[in-house]
Image (cartoon, helix red, strand yellow):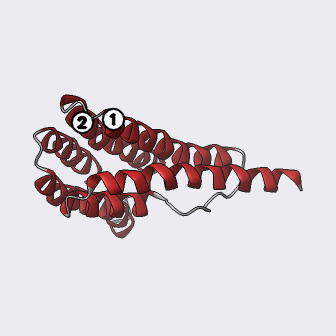
Amino acid sequence: LTVIGFGLNAAVGLIIVLGELRWAGAAFVLASIFDMFDGSLARLTNRVTPFGAFLDSNLDRFSEAAVCFGLLLLYTGKGAMIEVLLVYVVIVGSLMVSYSRARAEGLGLKCEVGLLGRPERVTILTLGLLLDWIVPALWVLAIFTNFTALQRIYHVWRLTRK
């Protein structure tokens, strides 16, 4: 399911490039269903492995990148440089949200704080695509992914000062 979810997200990126944002939103919903249930199915069938969890996390990042790459290509083709910049800021924020948590956990610290985890990012992006409000969704993501990364950095700073 993890690999299928990634393949569907890559298709979402292609649909975005074609300018079919609502269809991309519908495909993104389907891809997100696969992403949500892969871990649950592994637990239900007693097939949880460390590599499966590792692969899932990595393919989640690749999936986000594929969708954002579609948006970058769409807006670059239109010469919409503000939107290109917005997508770039979303990519950076999203990477930093994930990285800050992973790095904290690598230090043995819990880091589940912040406004915008992956489920919230997926929800905002889904609504933006389905409702054809992608630019407002990108603004929300650009601001709050980076804010969330800063929340996590501050959280780890506080934990390490004790």
Distance in Å between CA atoms under marks 1 and 2 = 6 Å
Q: Residues within 10 Å of mark 1 (few under 14, many from 20)?
A: many
Q: Give the residue at mark 2.
A: 75
Q: Relative to 8, is 106 on the left or the right?
A: right
Q: Residue furthest bottom?
A: 44
Q: Is residue 105 something one can see in this rendering?
A: yes
The correct choice, above or below, for 110 with respect to 55 in the image is below
Image quadrant where residue 114 sits: bottom right
Tags 1 and 2 touching, CB below 8 Å:
yes
Assign the N terminus to one quadrant of the image: bottom left
Query: Going 40% across and 43% down the picture, which residue do you hit?
Result: 61
Image quadrant where residue 46 sits: bottom left
Query: Going 42% across and 40% down the picture, which residue do you hit?
Result: 91
Q: Position of residue 27 (x, y in %)?
A: 15, 55
Q: Residue furthest right?
A: 162
Q: Residues within 10 Å of mark 2 (few under 14, many from 20)?
A: many
Q: Relative to 112, is 117 on the left or the right?
A: left
The correct choice, above or below, for 55 with respect to 30 in the image is above
Assign the C terminus to one quadrant of the image: bottom right
Q: SS class of the residue under badge 1?
A: helix
Q: SS class of the residue under badge 2?
A: helix
Q: Is residue 48 something one can see in this rendering?
A: no
Q: Disc 1 or 2, which lies upstream in sequence? A: 2
Q: Position of residue 147 (x, y in %)?
A: 58, 53
**Residue type indicated by callout 2:** Tyr
Q: Give the number of the disc on residue 97.
A: none
Q: Give the number of the disc on residue 84.
A: 1
**Residue type indicated by callout 1:** Val
